[in-house]
Image (cartoon, helix red, strand yellow):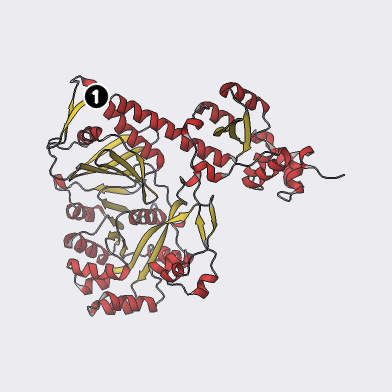
């Protein structure tokens, strides 16, 4: 009997096309009732079937087109909004575009005639179904309905904003109404900005004045993205409210100010570090969002290569010495050190941290936050820590000679010390300690490991495609044409999963300098970072550049 997918059950189509085996289908038939899912969804849940293969089989069976995922990055909000969000979520459907003969909608289950009939009644037009994967559908619903909500809320806030003029000298808004709700639109806007940032997984919020608008940007995966541009008339109100929340001086507009806000949302508790600085167009606010929830990272998820992981895991279990992680702000230094503490934490070890601020909460570890305004500096806190019988001490950052000196004394008296330092690479971290004022013989005696690190963005797994680089690009990376010819280059085309950036998530690259006898001798003799680097390279150190290329 000839095979015709249009008259064949989906399980048989999947087997015939080679996507799954008969045994896997039989297992799915038995388990689908437990999952309350259809056969295809059950096979995906069991790990036997890929979403795109199910779509291809449904395309053969039903004859419907598959949604082009590139289209999902640029849908018309007005068309998406034709279907109410609760209905879209419940029935797994989204409006894609309007055509002359009807509305094209994406569905995960296009043979559900009840949904197609009710959509026709809701929209009053013919419905043209297309197939969409469940993951792509969920990401698309999240993205566009969030934009619809945000746009509506910003318009509501701006619409209720009542002001007469802006005094350019003072950048002060004169509110027409003196009633207590004059600030309500600003309150609504600031709440919206912070809530959406938390939902988006942003690490920083930038609120800056432009000539005609105020620009709001979020830093997500290390890159800034513009999310909204309210009118410039609201800017001073947003700044004033931020100052009130941060307990800063509202009247001071000429000098930089720093403060913090503790927030509790329905999702999580967040500590917000606020920095306000004057610019020629007005004051700019940058907020750093620190999640006060459970620390969810492990050493194995940070991106270590196997060889580097073995070195790092071995050295963090030494009984004494100093381990320093270096890199610029936002390079993941604190994350790495907290993951290391979590790895070696046990009931027999007393671990104490001194940080500014405490970025991650670790259960079972004593964490101290410095407060310079009341005299609780790194030096003061660390001197008291020594009387707390610690085994391991984490010093948030070595900033000056006092902190560095205490760290050295800790390590030389039998403690394991973790800390961070701002430096470009591992060899320059060693010379930076000497520049701070530590004697070379103390640096050489106490240092166990110096690790420089950076975070790099990863290509989105959903839209990655083959990429042919120009002749120059591999050469810029230090690759010969022969080496480049052996590499499969990929680039993200941009899709709804990655907000059309082509990147999703970040991973670490690491440069590990183990302080061995040769490097100790160079440090004792006052050798510069070039001599340290050459010796480390001979011992097998891989530079940040090489680590990035291998990634």
Query: Considering only vertical position in the picture, is 414 above or below 228?
Result: below
Q: Which residue: 31% across, 47% down?
A: 359
Asked whether 311 or 290 is in front, the reply is 290
The N terminus lies in quadrant:
top right
Q: Which residue: 35% across, 55% down?
A: 332
Question: Where residue 255 sits: x, y (%)?
Answer: 13, 45
Residue 256 sits in which quadrant? top left
Q: Is residue 395 left or right of residue 249?
A: right
Q: In the displayed image of the protein, which residue is found farthest to the right?
A: 1
Residue under numbered circle 1? 162
How many tags in the picture? 1
Query: Considering only vertical position in the picture, is 303 above or below 64?
Result: below
Asked whether 508 or 148 is in front, the reply is 148
Asked whether 400 or 345 is in front, the reply is 400
Question: Where residue 260 sits: x, y (%)?
Answer: 24, 40
Q: Is residue 32 left or right of residue 375?
A: right
Density class for disc 1 (Cα within 10 Å; few <14, some 14-19, many ≥20) is some
Q: Which residue: 20% across, 36% down?
A: 243
Residue 197 sits in which quadrant? top left
Query: Considering only vertical position in the picture, is 312 above or below 501?
Result: below
Question: Where residue 441 sits: x, y (%)?
Answer: 22, 74
Q: In terms of secondary structure, where does tag 1 sit? A: loop
Query: Considering only vertical position in the picture, is 135 above or below 340?
Result: above
Q: Which residue: 36% across, 35% down?
A: 195
Q: Is residue 178 left or right of residue 542?
A: left
């Amino acid at each position: 009997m000839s095979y015709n997918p249009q008259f064949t059950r989906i399980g048989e189509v999947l087997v015939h096309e080679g996507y799954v085996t008969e045994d896997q289908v039989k297992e799915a038939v038995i388990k689908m009732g437990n999952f309350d899912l259809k056969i295809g969804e059950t096979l995906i849940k069991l790990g036997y079937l890929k979403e795109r293969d199910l779509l291809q089989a449904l395309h053969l069976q039903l004859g419907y087109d598959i949604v082009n995922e590139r289209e999902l990055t640029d849908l018309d909000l007005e068309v998406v909004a034709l279907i109410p969000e609760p209905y879209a979520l419940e029935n797994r459907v989204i409006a894609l575009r309007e055509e002359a003969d009807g509305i094209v909608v994406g569905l995960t289950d296009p043979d559900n005639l009840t949904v197609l009939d009710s959509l026709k009644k809701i929209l009053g037009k013919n419905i043209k179904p297309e197939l969409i994967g469940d993951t792509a559908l969920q990401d698309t619903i999240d993205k566009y309905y969030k934009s619809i909500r945000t746009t509506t809320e910003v318009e509501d806030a701006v619409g209720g904003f009542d002001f007469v003029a802006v005094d350019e000298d003072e950048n002060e808004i004169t509110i027409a109404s003196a009633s207590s709700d004059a600030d309500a639109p600003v309150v609504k806007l600031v709440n919206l900005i912070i809530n959406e940032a938390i939902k988006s997984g942003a690490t920083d919020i930038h609120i800056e004045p432009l000539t005609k608008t105020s620009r709001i940007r979020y830093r997500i995966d290390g890159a800034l993205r513009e999310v909204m541009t309210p009118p410039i008339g609201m800017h001073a109100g947003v700044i004033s409210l931020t100052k009130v929340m941060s307990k800063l001086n509202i009247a001071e507009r000429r000098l930089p100010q720093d403060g913090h806000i503790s927030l509790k949302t329905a999702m999580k508790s967040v500590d917000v570090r606020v920095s306000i600085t004057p610019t020629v167009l007005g004051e700019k606010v940058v907020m750093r969002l620190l999640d006060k929830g459970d620390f969810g990272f492990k050493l194995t998820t940070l991106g270590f290569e196997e060889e580097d992981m073995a070195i790092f895991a071995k050295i963090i279990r030494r009984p004494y010495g100093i381990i320093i992680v270096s890199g610029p702000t936002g390079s993941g230094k604190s994350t790495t050190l907290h993951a290391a503490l979590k790895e070696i934490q046990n009931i027999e070890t007393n671990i104490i941290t001194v940080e500014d601020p405490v970025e991650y909460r670790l259960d079972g570890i004593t964490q101290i936050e410095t407060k310079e305004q009341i005299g609780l500096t790194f030096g003061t806190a660390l001197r008291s820590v020594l009387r707390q019988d610690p085994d391991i001490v984490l010093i948030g950052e070595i900033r000056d000679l006092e902190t560095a000196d205490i760290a050295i004394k800790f390590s030389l008296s039998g403690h394991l010390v973790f800390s961070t330092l701002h430096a470009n690479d591992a060899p320059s971290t060693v010379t930076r300690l000497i520049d701070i004022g530590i004697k070379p013989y103390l640096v050489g005696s106490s240092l166990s490991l110096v690790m420089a690190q950076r975070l790099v963005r990863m290509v989105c797994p959903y839209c990655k495609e083959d990429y042919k680089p120009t002749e120059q690009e591999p050469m810029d990376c230090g690759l010969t044409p022969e080496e480049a010819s052996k590499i499969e280059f990929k680039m993200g085309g941009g899709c709804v999963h990655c907000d059309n950036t082509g990147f999703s998530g970040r991973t670490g690259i690491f440069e590990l300098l183990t302080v061995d006898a040769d490097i100790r001798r160079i440090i004792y003799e006052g050798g510069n970072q070039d001599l340290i680097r050459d010796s480390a390279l001979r011992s097998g150190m891989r530079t940040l550049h090489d680590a990035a290329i291998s990634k």
